[in-house]
Image (cartoon, helix red, strand yellow):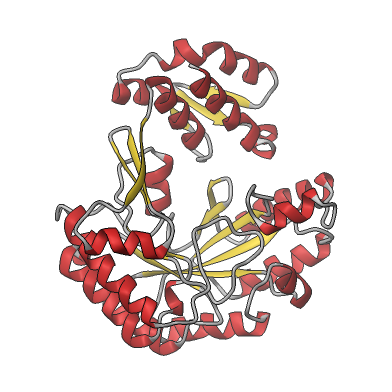
Amino acid sequence: MHVPFCVVKCGYCDFNSYVVEDRSVHDTFLEALERELAASWRGAPPVSVFIGGGTPSLLDPARLERLLQILARHVDLKDAPEVSMEANPESLTEEKAAIARAHGVRRLSMGVQSFHPHHLRFLDRAHSGERAEQAFAEARAAGFDNLSVDMMFGLPGETFDEWRADLERAIALRPDHVSAYNLTFEPGTRLHRDMQRGEVEPNEQEVDRAMFEFTRSRLAEAGFDAYEISNFAGPGGPCRHNDHYWLQGDYVGIGPGASSHRQGVRTTNSKPIESWAKAALAGLPPSASAETLRPRQRAAEALWLGIRRRDGVDVAAVEARLDLPVREWFGALLDEQQRQGLVRWDGACLRLTGDGLLVADRVGGEYLAIGVDR
């Protein structure tokens, strides 16, 4: 479920989110959300439920409760192995956390990114480091025993010592899961435009590499398992929802700009809230685009998504699931990547090497290039 509201549009963010002052738009959103959910979900037990955004915790307590009531009317949350919600420190309160917990949310993901004031300003974040720690404590007080913290490194001008201090402060919160992402300059974002104009320069690659390697070693030392390039499971275990994506599972997306995937057919909803809501309230599919993935494209995406996982991608299983000759199509490329020391075979599983982890986006991009070309 995609909740598209934010208190500020961060310059690095390419998600479908909006700053909306008129709170009546929230009510229209909730009404349309229920109509779309009723038409789209078939009532089967879900593998996982993820309430993301945007910032779900931006909704006021009454509207957050209404959102969760809508969800519960159509989805059996009791049987879902995982029910997650994203929150930001500036808008989460103990009251909102308690409402989420009471209505079946069992995993809370907190967008902290940094504890340093100057980095938070650069990222357009609306909270302070102290407020992040306070929000974390409030979520614990509300009964959450599975809390994830999102952090970001590789900011322009960020030093290794600054990132080390950020990571240590995050570990001190005793989270149950950590996501640590290298800042990327996504096309279409203000940050990317600033880079193109020469107003911002990416951090030095060697510094980013040192941060990446330190992150993995320090979190391992603290008891976190690196089950994916940027995700580390502690006592709360891996994020089942994201792992389902990486395994190319089917999913239903509800809300403006949300995407769905069913057996190789991908649809994406209209992004503007008004056009999405108008269609949903009229009983029409709110999708703006649909794409039937070609066989090589499906195979390429299976490799691209799966290679990010610590366990790699079981190529034989992909071939059986898709009934496609994946090793025949991609064999020459896989041999070259193996020659370069970027991937290795472990039985039928293809995994990134240590060097491959550092250039995972390039490795995966080479699979996608073959999928697009054919």
Q: Position of residue 322 (x, y in %)?
A: 31, 24
Q: Tell me the quarter of the picture where residue 4 sits.
A: bottom left
Instruction: Return the residue nearer the eye: 182 or 3.
Output: 3
Q: Tell me the quarter of the picture where residue 335 sits.
A: top right
316 relative position to 226: left or right: left
Residue shown at 82% from the left, 64% from the top: 161
Judge whether 277 appears above or below 352 on screen. below
56 relative position to 208: left or right: left
Judge whether 336 appears above or below 139 on screen. above
Residue shown at 55% from the left, 72% from the top: 174
Instruction: Return the residue nearer the eye: 158 or 310.
Output: 158
Q: Position of residue 373 (x, y in %)?
A: 53, 19
Judge whether 227 appears above or below 160 on screen. above
Judge whether 307 appears above or below 41 on screen. above
- Does residue 21 appear in the picture of this structure? yes
Q: Tell me the quarter of the picture where residue 325 sits.
A: top left
246 relative position to 121: left or right: left
Residue shown at 42% from the left, 17% from the top: 326
Quadrant that contains the N terminus: bottom left
In the displayed orientation, state which residue is furthest to the bottom.
95
Question: How many numbered marks, from 0 up?
Answer: 0
Q: Position of residue 274 (x, y in %)?
A: 38, 65
Residue shown at 46% from the left, 87% from the top: 93
- Does residue 81 appear in the picture of this structure? no
Q: Position of residue 243 (x, y in %)?
A: 41, 47
